[in-house]
């Protein structure tokens, strides 16, 4: 956009226009793709250390910042209603960078017991070795979260909806619990997207995204982001981006900017498709449980209605003979692809066996393991409903689920 001030704009407009771009006569009407790794500078313009970096430091080196990456940061901050953003090479680079810059030896982290498996493994397998204690709890249960807090708890991290079983956590309530304790709340909002939920407005301190998923939407770029207060984001840039080095390629950032332009339209399409597919699956005799936050049968449908303006396109279901059904679906599905990842224009389905995930990634025991097994049976089919005609998806599932 031309330099402001601007009237408040809706998300569909912000996704196309937010951020500073060159709008002089003859400039291109397109997000700039600047692949350069370094930029002309002057001896007095900038120091050589990231410690010398200030808000007005010009572009110097792409690991610090780059015009394409900066535009993506401005656009994400606008969509989330946050002051600033930092973009990374992947969702994991963003999340591990956030953890390692917020937590130090002696600190304690409370994390959703059900969240992205790679992050659960960082929390259980890597942080304790650095002296950072981790407690995984069912963050849909506020009492369990309160009970997990310790004097040294610095961060509560939740994912809502949580991957893969679409369990929700109440952002507003958890922000109040965190702040009353002097801790901060981070929310992985990858599955919700800013179209559904704006966690900062509900009190969260940080919003995290795997931009690889809905934000990009086309399945052709990896990226991650953290959005929050300007000062916190400047510290995160120095610590987690410049020093740990997980910078996004400007080309990936440019593809994600292109993807964001259609985010609100795509989310409307994903939600409509998921509504039709979830309603079909819910009546299917071969299945034991179908979960989608928009279904009245979802155990947290009331929270979904309060917290999500769009129920997103993720549907999860389970069957009594999961492994056998997984083989059958992988073989028979023609429109839906049997593949990992989510949030893409094309529909993707993947089967996640319960016991393997509990043992290797989530390390659940006791009540937590029981409640996870209760949600999933022997495994979860995670279906990312794409933008195909829902009637074709239903016909594909009908053929593939037949005895
Ligand atoms: C995919 C995903 C991540 C990890 O992101 P990458 O871009 O694959 O590194 C984190 N959180 C959620 C909820 C995800 O779906």
Image (cartoon, helix red, strand yellow):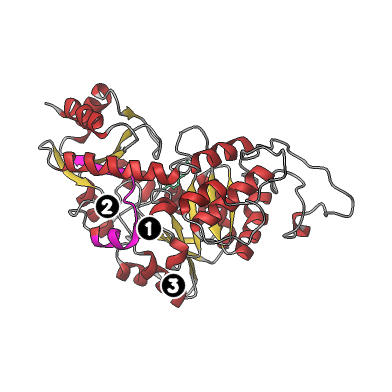
From the viewer's perspective, is the residue at label 1 or at label 2 nearer?
A: 2
Callout 1: few (<14), some (14-19), or many (20+) C-alpha neighbours within 10 Å? many
- Can residue 121 be seen here? The reply is yes
Mark 1: secondary structure: strand
Q: Is residue 108 left or right of residue 66?
A: left
Return the mark for residue 150: 3
Location of residue 320 in the rendering, given as x and y in whole percent from the top left corner: 15, 38
Q: CA distance from mark 1 to mark 2?
A: 18 Å
Q: Pointers 2 and 3 in contact (CB under 8 A)?
A: no
Q: Which residue is mark 1?
A: 112
Mark 3: secondary structure: loop
The relative height of residue 81 versus residue 182 in the rendered view (above or below) is above
The relative height of residue 140 versus residue 274 in the rendered view (above or below) is below
Q: Which residue is mark 2?
A: 293
Query: Camera-side residue: 206 or 392?
Result: 392
Q: Magenta stretch: give its range.
A: 302-319
Location of residue 159 in the rendering, given as x and y in whole percent from the top left corner: 39, 55
Q: CA distance from mark 1 to mark 3?
A: 16 Å
Callout 2: few (<14), some (14-19), or many (20+) C-alpha neighbours within 10 Å? many
């Amino acid at each position: 956009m031309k330099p402001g001030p601007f009237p408040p704009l809706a998300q569909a407009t912000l996704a196309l226009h937010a951020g500073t771009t060159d709008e002089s006569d003859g400039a291109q009407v397109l997000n700039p793709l600047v692949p350069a790794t370094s930029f002309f500078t002057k001896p007095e313009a900038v120091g050589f250390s990231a410690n010398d970096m200030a808000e007005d430091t010009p572009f110097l080196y792409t690991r610090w910042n780059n015009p394409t990456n900066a535009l993506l940061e401005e656009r994400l901050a606008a969509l989330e209603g946050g002051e600033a953003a930092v973009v990374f090479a992947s969702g994991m680079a963003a999340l591990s960078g956030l953890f390692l810059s917020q937590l130090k030896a002696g600190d304690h982290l409370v994390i959703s017991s059900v969240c992205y498996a790679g992050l659960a493994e960082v929390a259980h397998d890597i942080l304790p070795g650095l002296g950072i204690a981790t407690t995984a709890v069912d963050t849909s249960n506020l009492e369990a979260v309160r009970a997990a807090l310790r004097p040294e708890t610095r961060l509560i991290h939740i994912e809502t909806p949580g991957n893969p079983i679409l369990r929700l956590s109440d952002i507003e309530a958890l922000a109040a619990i965190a702040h009353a304790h002097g801790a901060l709340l981070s929310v992985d909002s990858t599955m919700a997207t800013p179209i559904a939920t704006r966690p900062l407005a509900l009190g969260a301190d940080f919003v995290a995204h795997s931009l690889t998923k809905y934000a990009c939407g086309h399945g052709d770029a990896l990226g991650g982001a953290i959005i929050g207060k300007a000062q916190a984001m400047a510290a995160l840039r120095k610590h987690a981006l410049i020093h740990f080095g997980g910078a996004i390629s400007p080309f990936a950032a440019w593809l994600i900017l292109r993807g964001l332009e259609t985010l609100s339209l795509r989310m409307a399409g994903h939600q409509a498709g998921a509504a039709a597919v979830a309603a079909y699956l819910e009546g299917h005799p071969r299945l034991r449980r179908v979960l989608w936050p928009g279904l009245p049968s979802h155990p947290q449908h009331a929270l979904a209605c309060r917290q999500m303006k769009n129920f997103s396109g993720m549907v999860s279901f389970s069957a009594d003979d999961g492994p056998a059904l997984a083989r059958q679906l992988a073989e028979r599905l023609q429109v839906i692809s049997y593949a990992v990842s989510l949030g893409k224009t094309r529909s993707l389905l993947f089967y996640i066996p319960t016991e393997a995930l509990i043992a290797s990634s989530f390390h659940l025991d006791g009540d937590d393991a029981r409640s996870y097994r209760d949600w999933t049976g022997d495994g979860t089919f995670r279906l990312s409903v794409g933008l195909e005609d829902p009637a074709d998806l239903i016909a594909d599932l009908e053929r593939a689920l037949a005895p």
